[in-house]
Image (cartoon, rainbow, N blue to C red):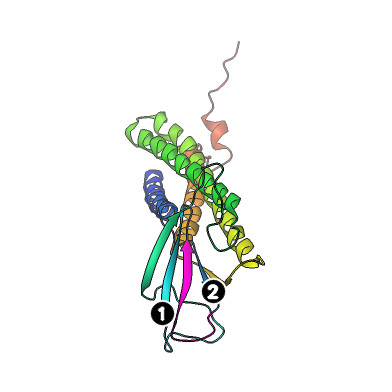
């Protein structure tokens, strides 16, 4: 396969990865939390949240939807929803978003790292545009910083995923929590897909930008100019 064809395939994969990561950052279905339901025909309150806001949903648990020893939900059931933005960067505000103390530092870290991921994606995209519009050696030269930026964006995405995972784990294990079940939503899946596509394709761009190695070890010696005698 020709080198330019490989680069085009890599760019397509990067576009998909960037779309997945951007979707994950702006949506709030990273995790779903459910309290315990002890009886049927009552209204319970489940929650789902992302990097920026928390949404609580009041769900009516009928006998058909109720499963013994399971939490409220699923979250896809109809119900009244109320969303509240996290007060990430407002000093002096109380961090009690749920009925217990939330781990606000986790959300601040995850949101900040996701912004770095978006910034690296923008820088990598600018390098790719310059590579596609450039001529000669400049085209391959810009692939190196582009690959690095996209690989860094993938790493930031992975750190964001891990921080959010630890946040959910900390909330569930808290003694003050009302939640007994949790699951990761489609926003979390989009972030995982974005991490894989961005990191691996960034590494691939770095490899493609490297000079091509000779097929035979003696090609370099044969192509070298002969030494002129004195």
Q: Which residue is mark 1?
A: 60
| 16 left or right, relative to 163 | left
Question: Compared to 52, does 89 lie above or below?
Answer: above
Q: Which residues are magenta?
A: 37-50
User: Front-most of 215 and 137?
Assistant: 137
Query: Where residue 102 sits: x, y (%)?
Result: 58, 57
In-image side of 229 versus 72 (left or right) = right
Residue 12 x/y as whole percent: 37, 51
Residue 35 is marked as 2
Mark 2–mark 1 Cα distance, whole angstroms, equals 13 Å
Q: Is residue 223 visible?
A: yes
Label 2 or label 1, whichever comes before in sequence order: 2
Up the image or down, 115 lies above or below 46; here it is above
Residue 48's place in the image compared with 221, above or below, is: below
Residue at 50 percent of width and 53 percent of height:
195
In percent of the image, x 52 and y 57: which residue is there? 97
Q: Residue furthest top?
A: 230
């Amino acid at each position: 396969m020709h080198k330019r064809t490989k680069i085009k395939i890599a760019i397509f994969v990067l576009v998909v990865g960037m779309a997945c990561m951007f979707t994950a950052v702006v949506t709030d279905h990273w995790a779903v939390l459910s309290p315990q339901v002890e009886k049927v025909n009552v209204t319970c309150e489940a929650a789902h949240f992302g990097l920026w806001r928390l949404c609580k949903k009041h769900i009516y648990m009928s006998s058909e939807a109720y499963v013994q020893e399971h939490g409220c939900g699923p979250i896809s059931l109809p119900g009244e929803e109320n969303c509240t933005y996290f007060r990430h960067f407002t000093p002096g505000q109380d961090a009690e978003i749920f009925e217990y103390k939330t781990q606000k530092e986790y959300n601040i870290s995850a949101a900040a790292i996701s912004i770095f991921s978006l910034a690296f994606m923008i820088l990598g995209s600018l390098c790719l545009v310059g590579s596609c519009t450039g001529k000669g050696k400049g085209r391959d030269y810009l692939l190196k910083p582009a690959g690095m930026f996209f690989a860094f964006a993938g790493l930031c995405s992975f750190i964001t995923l891990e921080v959010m995972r630890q946040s959910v784990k900390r909330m569930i294990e808290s003694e003050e929590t009302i939640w007994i079940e949790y699951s990761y939503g489609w926003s979390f899946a989009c972030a995982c897909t974005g991490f894989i596509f961005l990191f691996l394709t960034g590494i691939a761009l770095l490899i493609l930008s490297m000079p091509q190695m000779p097929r035979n070890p003696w090609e370099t010696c044969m192509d070298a100019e002969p030494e002129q005698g004195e």
